[in-house]
Amino acid sequence: MASWRVQTRHFVLPKEGSGPEECEDAVAFDAGALRFAVADGATEAFDARRWAARLAAEWVGAVRAPLSAAEFGPWLKEQGEWLRASWEGRKLPWYAEEKRRAGSYAAFVALRLEGEGRRMKWRAVALGDSCLVQRRGGELITAFPLSRPEEFGSAPPLAPSSDGVREAALAKLVEREGGAEPGDTFLLMTDALSAWYFDASARRDPAAERFDSLLAASENGSLADLVRRERAAARLKDDDVAVVRIQLVSRQ
């Protein structure tokens, strides 16, 4: 029997002035299967909210969650076919029809944990600017595909629903793996939150530690207040935010 267990917390907050139904960030996880995913739909794309939710949920629920470009490509094609089929027969104004032809896009990051006893390893995949962070003993030991606030730009690679640009996108897919120990914490975060977290951590801003402690305690009301304060101070971009926190805990 494994000598560790997983504690999972998550938090999603739309941009200021938007309701939950407008949020284009999505989370999905199955703590029993040790799979976790976050996706961030591109605002300018067609049906981005549903595309992000589909990618996160289907990756977590897949018979074999894709963790390489060779696996991810056919899986992404299947998801795109599902999305396009769901649009059939819909009557749209001309401007929406143009967007539909271009397809939908989302940043994506996902994590799978594996282990037996006290030996654990993880594998992860990312496409775009949603990020994975691994912390141990209060220190950040892994961050990818980005790790510094200045690396975030306006045109990250994204997971597309359309066929024509899939191969170019897959060339930007990042695969990573590593070891883990009881006590380690993983964060999967969408871009605005990731950029803020890297900046706050680099500055040793107490807000970064407070963010993690509130998330660990599922104090989502206080967490929303913290995010709003950071937005108001222009330290955190006013965008949808989503995070899944995974902590490995020793069994007593």
Image: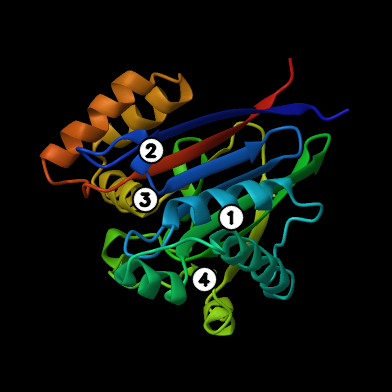
Within the image, what quadrant is residue 219 found in? top left
Q: Name the residue under label 4.
A: 160
Residue 115 image point, x, y percent: 79, 42
Left or right: residue 184 compared with residue 90 = right
* Residue 226, image quadrant: top left
65, 184: nearer the viewer:
65
**Residue 50 visible in rendering:** yes
Residue that label 2 marks? 21
Amino acid type shown at disc 1: Leu
Residue 165, placed above or below residue 5: below
Residue under pointer 1: 55
Where's residue 46, x and y in %? 41, 63
> Viewed as shown, does residue 142 lie left or right of 229?
right
Whole-Å distance between the Cαs marked 2 and 3?
22 Å
Q: In which quarter of the image is the N terminus?
A: top right
- Name the residue type under label 2: Glu
Question: Which residue is at a point 23% across and 38% down the rendered structure image?
Answer: 205
C-alpha gap between disc 4 and disc 1: 10 Å
Q: Tag 1's secondary structure?
A: helix
- Ranked by sequence position, the earlier of labels 3 and 1 is 1
